[in-house]
Image (cartoon, rainbow, N blue to C red):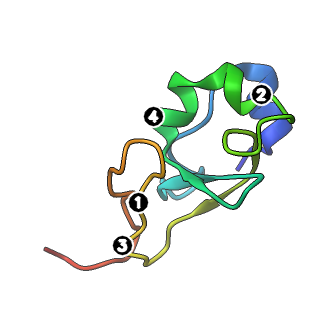
Amino acid sequence: MANIEEMRKDGVYESFAWPGGYPLFYITADGGVLCPKCANENFEQTCDPDDPQWFIVDCDVNWENESLYCDHCNELVESAYGGDD
């Protein structure tokens, strides 16, 4: 998985980790969660360290959390091994 600085330089936040294709989510400086779609649609804001609600500091795979929602759009962030519903 690429690091945040590499993604910023490329101008795109990845949706899935490689290898494996596991779903990613992004963590902001204030501890919020962003889905890849919102991170990419608001790319400039995510690069501003003076805006902790948007500034992305890390990313992770959503392994099993079936109730992880994006703090911007409130969409469910897919989990890699969550329920089979």
Q: Of discs 2 and 3, which sits in the foreground? A: 3
Q: N-terminal of the two: label 1 or label 4? A: 4
Q: Which mark is residue 67?
A: 3
Few, some or many residues within 10 Å of mark 3 (<14, 14–19, 20+): few
Do labels 1 and 2 touch, CB within 8 Å?
A: no
Task: From this view, report whether residue 72 is shown above or below residue 27.
Answer: above
Q: Which residue is mark 2?
A: 8
Report the side of 53 relative to 67 (left or right): right
Residue 3 appears at what percent x and percent y? 80, 45
Residue 68 appears at what percent x and percent y? 42, 67
Quadrant of the frame with the C terminus: bottom left
Could you tell me how many numbered marks the image carries? 4
Few, some or many residues within 10 Å of mark 4 (<14, 14–19, 20+): some
**Identity of the residue drawn at 81% across and 22% down:** 9
Give the Cα distance between marks 4 and 3: 18 Å
Do labels 3 and 1 touch, CB within 8 Å?
A: yes
Residue 35 appears at what percent x and percent y? 48, 46
